[in-house]
Image (cartoon, grey):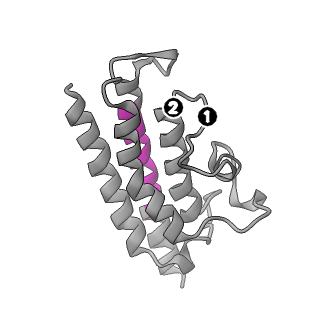
Amino acid sequence: MKEENIFKQLETVRSVTVELLESIPESNWDIIPKGFRNNIRWNAGHILTIQDLLANDFRSISENLPDKYLAYFSKDTSPDNWTEKPPSKEELLKLLKDQSTWIRTTCEGKLDQKLDKPFRGFKTFGELLLFGSFHDGMHTGIINAQGKIVNEHK
């Protein structure tokens, strides 16, 4: 697959995610619906943090995100464990909108490069970024469901 197509995929999926998040009032972002262990804010931050880790081959998050995002939004974290005020909707949306540009800048010309260690059978940055697009979409579906559940119970 051509590099440009991969970056276009990332941008398109992310724009769908951002559009959905923009449509949900921030007052609904912190409600954890029954049957879920996280909320909309966590899912938005999780998408952002994991995609950043993927683009850095899991070495660390980039300078584009505050270090505290790992504690807030990594796998197996939960808003129940937050001890400080989490990032605002505005902050998360800005970072989500800008991330595709950082990823393109960081990864352009490197998508055929081998990963330090294969992940789930993926061996190149391009494959890993496409997995990130799937991950984005999966959490966008969760955000959509949570948004509907929260709206019905208000």
Q: Residue at x 76, y 65 (%)?
A: 84
Q: Which quarter of the rendering shows the C terminus?
A: bottom right
Give the label on residue 56, or none. Answer: 2
Percent position (x, y) of residue 53?
A: 54, 36
Horizontal side of 13 relative to 103 (left or right) equals left
Q: Secondary structure at mark 2?
A: loop
Q: Secondary structure at mark 1?
A: loop
The amino acid type, in three-letter code, at marker 1 is: Ser
Q: Is residue 101 above or below residue 25?
A: above
Q: Are marks 1 and 2 in contact (CB under 8 Å)?
A: yes
Q: Closer to the camera, 72 or 59?
A: 59
Q: Residue at x 31, y 57 (%)?
A: 15
Please tell me whether residue 99 belongs to the stretch shown in magenta. no
The amino acid type, in three-letter code, at marker 2 is: Asn
Count the marks: how many? Answer: 2
What predominant SS class does the magenta segment belong to?
helix
Does residue 141 appear anywhere in the picture?
A: no
Residue located beneath label 1 in the image: 60
Q: Residue at x 56, y 80 (%)?
A: 27
Q: Specify start and end residues of the magenta stretch as a single range.
A: 129-143
Q: Closer to the camera, 81 or 108?
A: 108
Q: Is residue 40 above or below residue 125?
A: below
Percent position (x, y) of residue 130?
A: 35, 33
Percent position (x, y) of residue 62?
A: 55, 40
Please tell me whether residue 140 belongs to the stretch shown in magenta. yes
